[in-house]
Image: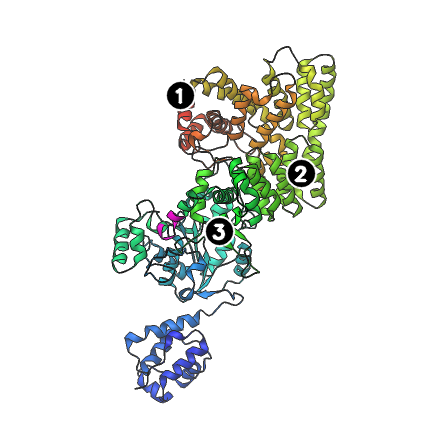
Amino acid sequence: MTSRPDPTTVETLTELAQTLDELRASRSYAELDKAVRPDKLPSSTLNNLLSGATLPTQETLERYLRACGVPREQRSAWYAARQRVASSAPQGLPDTVRVAHADQRRLGVHAAIKVEGAPGDLPTYVARDVDAGPDGVRALVGRAAARGGLVLLVGGSSVGKSRCAFEALRAVVPHWWLWHPADAARIRQVATAPPGRLVVWLDELQRYLGGSAGLQAATVRTLLHARTVMIATLWPERYTTYTASPASHRSDLYAAERELLDLADVIHLPASFSVAEQARAQAAAAAGDQRIAVALRSADYGLTQTMAAAPQLVDRWRGADPYAAAILDAAIDATRLGVVSPLSADLLRAAAPGYCDPRQRAAAPANWFETALAYATATLNGAAAALAPVADHTSMGQISGYLVADYLQQHAGQQRRLLQVPATCWQAMIDHLNDSGDQTRTAYAAQNRLMNQYAEPLYRQAVNTGDSQAVSLLTSLLVSQGRMREAVAMWRHRAEAGDPSAVAALADLRDEQDRAAAAASTWRRQAETGDRSAAIRLTGLLVGQGQTEEARALWPLTTLDGGATFTTDIAEALTTAMELKDPYLRRHSERMSQLVAMIGHQLGMTPDDVEAARLAALLHDVGKLAVPSAVFLKSGALTEEEFTLIKMHVTHGASIVRQIADLFGGTRRAAAAHPHIARALDGILHHHERFDGRGYPLGLVAEEIPQIARAIAVADAFDAMTTGRWYRGARSLEEAVAELHEGAGSAFDPQIVEAFVLWLDG
């Protein structure tokens, strides 16, 4: 008996026609037509079918299989062949592959630990609870295949998101084409003429988001209209950050990301297995999967984390000798500070000394770096390395840099997030980073830590490669340091290149200078006659205009015997500069000073702490002196770049107060030694932190945030809500209190909200 042709090898229309022709053997067209009566298989239909002229309909194929005597139970393989042909490789996407043929490891699925007797990279898939059900991953993929859809799996590192997503695709759309795009720009290109039966794989979705160049909701909608299946993964903290409601319509940094995520069907994947999942894992282990058997014996980590060598990664980090620990900690710090590109060996070598003590540095052997790097890059149980070597897109067999394992970065980065980064690491990033995005992000991180000596050179390097955001941030930094001429030169250069934001900044500056000149003329005459108050106010105007040397020369006219009024004079000078920028700033700051003092009394603060809190509240917005008025006075929603500038006012504020206090301290106490100013700096720097850790500049959590800053956050929100501006009306007292209660525990310290509301009620 002649064997039947195998339809499972069919991929193209030509192959389908040839295989069907083999299937009919010696049967004539008339015999085939007769075999399906009363249905028909006319000669014209058979000619098209067997010549490969057109793809047969499902009905025609079914009749042909009956005519050839194919049993019903064997026809599904032929139907599957037709479906594969129907979704032939999309034009212009040579890097697509059938879902069923895709390499999971290349899609981001972690290799599993090696165990004797366990073949291959991956263990048996243990079905997750979220796989099944009417709203499970597979049902959502099925609905997306029918009408287009974005399915998002949210979960921590190494919890099985990518494997769960891929298994759903393989179960539901095995013959569709899978595409793993390089970036958002490539997705936008494909969306102009989206092909059918396409799966867009977006593992680590955050890589495609961010700014005007990131993936936008409009692009996703275009793909979904074309019935594209999009499947993505994201860490929980990133999902929470992107989807959190903004504090106001003017500070909506993640509006684009939230709009995109609103299009997604979201599945949250827990880190630990449920009882049912554990039972399925035990069944797989009993059936012979030794890797799952080993993972089930781990008490400290979940099964999927154990599979991805998470215990070994953490042990590798904790058990490293001083030199291996130095390059691992340097890599972890650089990554958490914003470096996305692979870290070069030169950067790691240069950063490492700051992580060792003097004796360790002196005792380092000649090959310390090579030995440490070998330790850090060793593959653990066949699954992962603490530092993974990677190549660039153009070379083979050559290491371009190293990336920290995701789980180790998540675990160790959290433990190191509040530790001071050594100077050698900052300098290594200055000397060895080449990507402008990395340079801007690390400069921003340095500035958030008041380390402007590292921020400025990193910004300048990014500016030299054309990073527009770096230009905005650098000019703002220069203004905060009183270097107005340098900032103006940069604004003018950008304005001449056609940048509208620079044109607006220059216009703001001219307006401020005109108003300052009129006021300064009056106050200078009064100061020369001995009017101390006029001298202080004139000093503030000069500071606001970046004329610090003239301000310092004028300051002796304000001096009284003793130092009791030092902080008061500094506050008066700086609030005068704020009033020049925007009269509302001074009125708001004076109200804030009163509100925070009342909160301090209600909380039982000491008199010194109350005075420091009052000073911090009075100066909490002084950093806006370094932000163009067109940005912080804008009535509409802010762009990402504008909101980044707004966020920098906290670091600018702390920097300005510290510099001015030192500049004008003279024979009095230095700013850092003055108890009120030292504590006020903490309040100024951290008053936009959130109790849940999603604030800025450092993402401090709960009691990590100085109490003064927590008090300012509550008073600032209340005053902003109950004070009308031209772009919105004021809310009632009841509405404001209700919003404070709603934000207690997330945005605000619940204890301070309670104390403030009690004071209002009293």
Q: Secondary structure at mark 2?
A: helix
Q: Is residue 659 magenta?
A: no
Question: What's the magenta region?
Answer: 306-312
Task: Point out which mark residue 504 bears.
Answer: 2
Q: Earlier in the sequence, mark 2 or mark 3?
A: 3
Task: Point out which mark residue 554 bears.
Answer: none
Q: Is residue 128 above or below residue 742?
A: below
Q: Earlier in the sequence, mark 1 or mark 3?
A: 3
Q: Is residue 7 above or below residue 291?
A: below
Q: From the viewer's perspective, is the residue at label 2 or at label 3 nearer?
A: 3
Q: From the viewer's perspective, is the residue at label 1 or at label 3 nearer?
A: 3
Hey, what amino acid is under mark 1?
Answer: Leu
Hey, what amino acid is under mark 3?
Answer: Ala
Q: Is residue 107 above or below residue 629?
A: below
Cα gap from disc 1 to disc 3, whole angstroms:
61 Å
The residue identified by callout 3 is: 374
Q: Is residue 267 above or below residue 59?
A: above
Relative horizontal placement of residue 471, taking residue 683 as reference (left or right): right
Cα gap from disc 2 to disc 3, whole angstroms:
53 Å
Q: Secondary structure at mark 3?
A: helix
| Towards the viewer: 351 or 434 | 351
Q: Is residue 433 visible?
A: yes
The residue identified by callout 1 is: 758
